[in-house]
Image (cartoon, grey):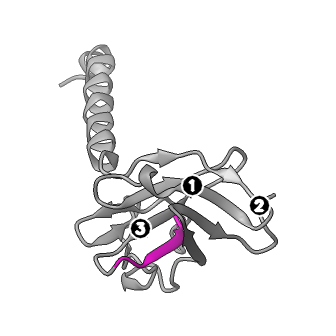
Amino acid sequence: MKRRGFVQRLPVLTAGLAAGASAALIGGCASAPYVVPQRTPRGLSLRASELGPDGDAFVQAPGMERPVYVRRHASGSLTAVLASCTHQGCQPEPVGNRLECPCHGSQFSFEGEVLAGPADRPLTRYEVTETDGEIVVLLPGGAR
């Protein structure tokens, strides 16, 4: 194909790529809802009923650069990790039984441990409590 033909077809090609990428992103994030928590003096608070069907959610208050990924495990315990890959800061997404970074393929356990690189450090992990159906993610210095 000559340059002129390529340039003329470029809007069609990029529209198709954008549509495909959007579908992939929407499909990849469908199982974990985004929850806007209440800020508390100690951290972020959400109702246990706000967790998605897989027992997880991305929790992001206004002003936060990246959300916190909260997950209830089969044992009933909860974990909370900062959803920011320690390789280059992209947001890992739940895929099967792990969190996977879409940028360079790093994989993490739901507890934040590195399963596969290029990341070589675990995700930042936060203490999380649950009382009477209220989940609180405890943040260092409280919620700002």
Nearest the camera: 97 or 19? 97
Kindly identify which residue carries mark 2: 143
The tag on residue 46 is 1
- Residue plotted at (31% across, 72% down): 98
Kindly identify which residue carries mark 3: 71
Amino acid carrying mark 3 in the image: Arg
Spatial CA distance of label 1 from label 3 is 12 Å
Q: If the image is split into quadrants, where does the C terminus sit? A: bottom right
Q: Position of residue 27 (x, y in %)?
A: 26, 43
Earlier sequence position, callout 1 versus callout 3: 1
SS category of the residue bearing label 3: strand
Quick check: 61 above or below 120? Answer: above
Earlier sequence position, callout 2 versus callout 1: 1
Q: Say left or right for 48 vs 74.
A: right
In the rendered structure, are the residues bearing label 1 and label 3 in contact, judged by CB atoms less than 8 Å apart?
Answer: no
Earlier sequence position, callout 2 versus callout 3: 3
Q: Position of residue 138 (x, y in %)?
A: 67, 72
Q: Which residues are magenta?
A: 76-84
